[in-house]
């Protein structure tokens, strides 16, 4: 695997990305969930390269190594980086994939820039009801600060390792903790954008061919099933088991399904 890391200018400063340099195939921008970073898709990059797809894993502003905003951005603000990415790489159009929060960003980008998106991949869409969104949008930001005895690591470890319906791998949990503390006290910005996003408008307005993925161990599995009924024209695929870190923990299986969709 030959990973290239680079930066480009964005609305909040520099945006960091990773890609496999072995091919210049059809482009696919990948947007991670919060609170994570491009590490989530890094294991997928060589698999995509072997399929002739130039996958580019992006650190969403405020996460990973990307500069962040000074105040909570909207989902539209996050999605606007898609134009920056196209300009930087010289693409007229590209494919977009997103997971959880990243799925909301990808959906908004596909809605906002319909003529610039080839195909769309969504996995774990926060397709909550309006009532659920309103409840989740209530301020409840409790950043786990640093404690002298180091117990903060254990507390955050339990938060990520035991989240959802199934435990994540040790390495995925470890990387989640690193991403959490790199993002710092603004780590909640991404989820805030999700819970104040008109996901129903975005989903209803998607025009490009779309693949909706879910896995039974993901806490957003019920929402994905609801979305598949709202948009029966979306291609739908469900993996058995796994956790909310399915992409990182099962890169070969995930990229196989996505590659087949893109290369069809």
Image (cartoon, helix red, strand yellow):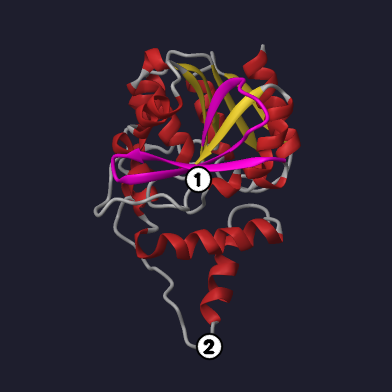
Local crowd at mark 1 within 10 Å, few (<14), some, or many (≥20)? many
- Labels 2 and 1 touching (C-beta < 8 A): no
Q: Which residue is mark 2?
A: 149
In the rendered image, which quarter contains the N terminus? top right
Determine whether, in the image, residue 89 is placed left or right of residue 172.
Answer: left
Q: Main secondary structure of the magenta part?
A: strand
Residue at the bottom extreme, as displayed: 149
Q: Which residue is mark 1?
A: 33
Range drawn in magenta: 1-30
The quadrant holding residue 144 is bottom left
- For marks 2 and 1, the one nearer the N-term is 1
Which residue is found at the position 70% from the left and 47% from the top? 249
Query: In 3D space, how far apart are the residues under numbered discs 2 and 1 (Cα atoms)?
Result: 30 Å
Which residue is found at the position 68% from the left and 23% from the top? 259
Determine whether, in the image, residue 239 is placed left or right of residue 99.
Answer: right
Of residues 232 and 145, the one nearer the viewer is 145
Q: Is residue 254 above or below residue 195?
A: above
Q: Secondary structure at mark 2?
A: loop
Q: Is residue 165 above or below residue 94?
A: below
Query: Is residue 204 among the parts visible in the rendering?
Result: yes
């Amino acid at each position: 695997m030959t990973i290239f890391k680079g930066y480009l200018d964005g609305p909040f400063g520099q945006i960091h990305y990773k890609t496999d340099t072995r091919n210049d195939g059809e482009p696919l921008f990948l947007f991670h969930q919060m609170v994570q970073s491009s590490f989530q898709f890094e294991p997928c990059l060589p698999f995509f390269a072997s399929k002739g797809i130039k996958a580019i894993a992006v650190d969403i502003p405020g996460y990973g190594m990307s500069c962040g905003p000074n105040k909570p951005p909207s989902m539209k603000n996050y999605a606007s980086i898609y134009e920056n990415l196209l300009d930087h790489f010289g693409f007229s159009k590209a494919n977009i994939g997103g997971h959880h929060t990243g799925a909301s960003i990808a959906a908004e980008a596909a809605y906002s820039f319909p003529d610039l998106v080839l195909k769309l991949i969504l996995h774990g869409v926060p397709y909550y009801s309006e009532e659920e969104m309103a409840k989740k949008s209530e301020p409840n930001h409790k950043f786990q600060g640093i404690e002298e005895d180091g117990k903060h690591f254990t507390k955050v470890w339990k938060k990520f390792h035991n989240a959802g319906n199934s435990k994540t791998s040790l390495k995925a949990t470890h990387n989640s903790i690193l991403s959490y503390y790199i993002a710092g006290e603004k780590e909640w910005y991404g989820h805030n954008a999700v819970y104040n996003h008109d996901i129903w408008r975005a989903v209803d307005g998607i025009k490009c061919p779309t693949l909706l993925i879910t896995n039974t161990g993901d806490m957003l599995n019920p929402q994905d099933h609801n979305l598949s009924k709202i948009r029966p024209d979306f291609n739908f695929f469900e993996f058995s088991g796994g956790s909310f870190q399915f992409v990182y923990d099962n890169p070969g299986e995930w990229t196989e399904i996505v590659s087949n969709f893109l290369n069809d």
